[in-house]
Image (spheres, helix red, strand yellow):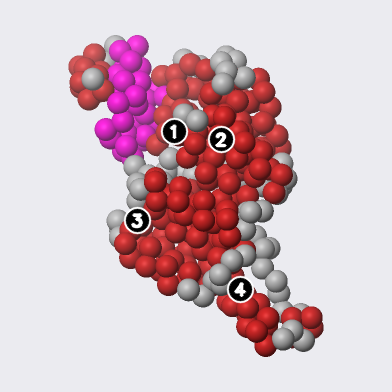
Amino acid sequence: MKNIKILLAALFAVAGCSAYPQDSAENAAAEPSQKDEVQKENLTQDVLDRLYAQTGPLLEEGKTAEALAVWEKALADAGESGPARSLVLLGIGDVHKYGGDLAKAEEFYGKSSEANPSNPYALERLAELALAAGNSEKAGELLKKARAADPGYMNSYVRSGILLKQDGNLREALKVFVSVINSGFPDPMAYNEAGVLLLMNFGKPKEAAKLFETALELDPDNAQYINNLANAYMAMGEYDTAIGHYRRSLELAPDDALTNANLAATLVRCEKLDEAKKYAQRAY
């Protein structure tokens, strides 16, 4: 099940960027056509929060077309180019991505980047799609551009860590995730990815559990993070606690094969064979 909360967190992060000019004596003294354009961009910035707030409930209800209509109407007020148009195009891309149309999402992320080449958000989104398609070389180039556009934009570093992990550079990947965590940037994915490495590759389940718990503080209903936390307790031999977390994960994602298999294996260790058989059947 897709997680609307993470999407909205990303959207609100975009809303908080300082890409738009504020009213000033210089703007007030501008020629009428220039001033109108400034006001148009300010208007777009002012209504971004409202657009995100409108979009979230619509997406939760599966009303992708209605959500797109909200953004497309805003596009008419965003100017022909520049930061305002770039961010609205980004929002349209996010709606397409949430709706499962990755080709359209890539198209609008590309348009967003064209409207404002220094927009790191569009570049990071394009890199994510490239990673999902298995094109790590393209993803790496896009992430480099995103970091160059805004060195403080931590999502691009998280994606860089995932790229390193996929290429087998586990220690370097862990360093990237830890650097994001130490920066104070509240990205649950960084905590989760660092936890997975510590648990699966470095044999540190206790430390991993702490990271998964922090990820869940930021994203409480993420079934994957809950499953990972259960795995950490399983590795520590705390089977009852692990079982409780597996059950909670399955409440959110009942058809997840891996979590069903993990719960079945843990129940076998606890000699609860009849119940284990039920979850094993769901897994396989």
Answer above or below: position of 123 versus 224: below
Can you say whether 64 is above or below 98 in the image? below
- Compared to residue 145, the image places residue 282 above or below, namely above
How far from the left and from the top, in percent, is residue 231?
A: 45, 22
Q: Which mark is residue 139?
A: 2
Which residue is labeled 1 in the image?
133
Q: Main secondary structure of the magenta part?
A: helix
Which quarter of the rendered picture does the N terminus lie within?
top left
Q: Which residue is painted at 37% across and 67% down in the image?
A: 69
SS category of the residue bearing label 2: helix
Tell how many labels. 4
Mark 1 packing: few (<14 Cα in 10 Å), some, or many (20+)? Answer: few
Determine whether the residue tagged by mark 3 lies in a helix, strand or loop.
Answer: helix
Find out whether residue 262 is within the magenta segment: yes
In the drawing, does residue 154 fall left or right of residue 3? Answer: right
- Would residue 191 be counted in the magenta stretch? no
Sequence-first tag of 1 and 4: 4
**Can you identify the residue that label 3 sits on?**
60
Relative depth, front residue between 116 and 188:
116
Split into 4 quadrants, where in the image is the C terminus? top left
Foreground label between 1 and 3: 1
Q: Position of residue 224 (x, y in %)?
A: 42, 33
Q: Residue at x 56, y 70 (%)?
A: 80
Instruction: Specify start and end residues of the magenta stretch as a single range.
Output: 240-269
Spatial CA distance of label 2 from label 4 is 30 Å
Q: Secondary structure at mark 4?
A: helix
Discs 1, 4 touching: Cβ within 8 Å: no
Which amino acid type is shown beneath numbered disc 4?
A: Glu
